[in-house]
């Protein structure tokens, strides 16, 4: 991850005619937290399949396997935050109170990732090709989302920016750490997405939870 951050940050700064000190912290935060999101989604989608042997022999709650996936990726994120801290110290970026807002953003990101992974895991238990499709879609979304490239003025009204929940989630963490502020628009949108997502997922869960073991 460190090599990827340096490679993209330095090379794309030259390609986009941007200062390295402006782009590299943006890229570091984008790649590290994108990796967290994509790994939770990918692994969460296969959580019930991977834990099939345990589920067939016990009565453990299904969401426990999603929580285990999230905790495992939090441990990986903690290791990769060394890259973020190193970059921010090198360029002397001190967000101060923005770190608290970043914590709020990370919490909202996790809430949304959890309901999405739970819904995806139930679908994947029935249709085993879904995890491979999700992995391919995530690779496609990675290049469409401003993870390592900064949207220009002409793209600010583009759906890739204005209607992209992945971008909103990233910005809830990245912007407070870089600028010390949080966009209330992104915050409101992701809170609404989280509430609606959990309502739909819980309804789906109540209808499907008893069938998951039979699917496996």
Image (cartoon, rainbow, N blue to C red):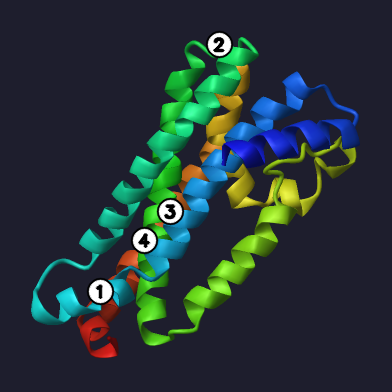
Residue 41: percent from left, percent from top: 46, 60
Secondary element under disc 3, as helix, strand or loop, is helix
Q: Marks 4 and 2, how far apart in space?
A: 38 Å
The one of 38 and 109 positioned closer to us in this rendering: 38
Specify whether 166 is left or right of 212. right
Please report contact status of discs 2 and 3: CB closer than 8 Å, yes or no: no
Q: Which numbered disc, 4 or 1, marks the residue that appears first in the sequence?
A: 4
What residue is pinned by disc 2? 94
- Residue farthest to the front, as pictured: 3
Q: Marks 2 and 1, how far apart in space?
A: 45 Å
Please report contact status of discs 4 and 2: CB closer than 8 Å, yes or no: no
Q: Which numbered disc, 3 or 1, marks the residue that appears first in the sequence?
A: 3
Q: Which numbered disc, 4 or 3, marks the residue that appears first in the sequence?
A: 3
Q: Marks 3 and 1, how far apart in space?
A: 19 Å
- The image quadrant where one finds the C terminus is bottom left
Residue 179: percent from left, percent from top: 63, 18
Residue 39: percent from left, percent from top: 47, 55
Tag shown at residue 199: 4
Neighbours of disc 3 within 10 Å: few (<14), some (14-19), many (20+): many
Specify whether 66 is left or right of 107. left
Please report contact status of discs 4 and 1: CB closer than 8 Å, yes or no: no
Q: Nearer the viewer, mark 4 or mark 2?
A: 2
* Quarter of the image where one finds residue 29: top right
Secondary element under disc 1, as helix, strand or loop, is helix
Q: Marks 2 and 3, how far apart in space?
A: 28 Å
């Amino acid at each position: 991850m460190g090599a990827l951050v340096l490679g993209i940050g330095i090379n794309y700064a030259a390609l986009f005619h941007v200062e390295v000190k402006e782009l590299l912290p943006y890229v570091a935060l984008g790649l590290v937290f994108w990796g967290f999101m994509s790994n939770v989604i990918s692994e969460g989608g296969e959580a019930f399949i991977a834990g099939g042997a345990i589920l067939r022999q016990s009565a453990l709650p299904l969401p426990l396997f999603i929580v285990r996936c999230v905790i495992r990726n939090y441990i990986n994120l903690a290791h990769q935050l060394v890259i973020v801290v190193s970059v921010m110290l090198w360029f002397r970026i001190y967000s101060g109170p923005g770190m608290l807002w970043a914590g709020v953003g990370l919490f909202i990101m996790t809430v949304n990732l959890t309901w999405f992974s739970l819904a995806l895991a139930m679908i994947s238990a029935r249709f085993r090709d879904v995890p491979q499709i999700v992995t391919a879609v995530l690779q496609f979304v990675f290049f469409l989302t401003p993870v390592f490239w900064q949207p220009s003025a002409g793209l600010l009204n583009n759906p890739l920016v204005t209607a992209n929940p992945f971008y909103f989630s990233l910005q809830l963490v990245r912007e407070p750490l870089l600028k010390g502020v949080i966009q209330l628009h992104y915050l409101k949108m992701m809170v609404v997405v989280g509430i609606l997502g959990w309502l739909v997922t819980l309804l789906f869960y109540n209808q499907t939870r008893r069938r998951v073991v039979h699917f496996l």
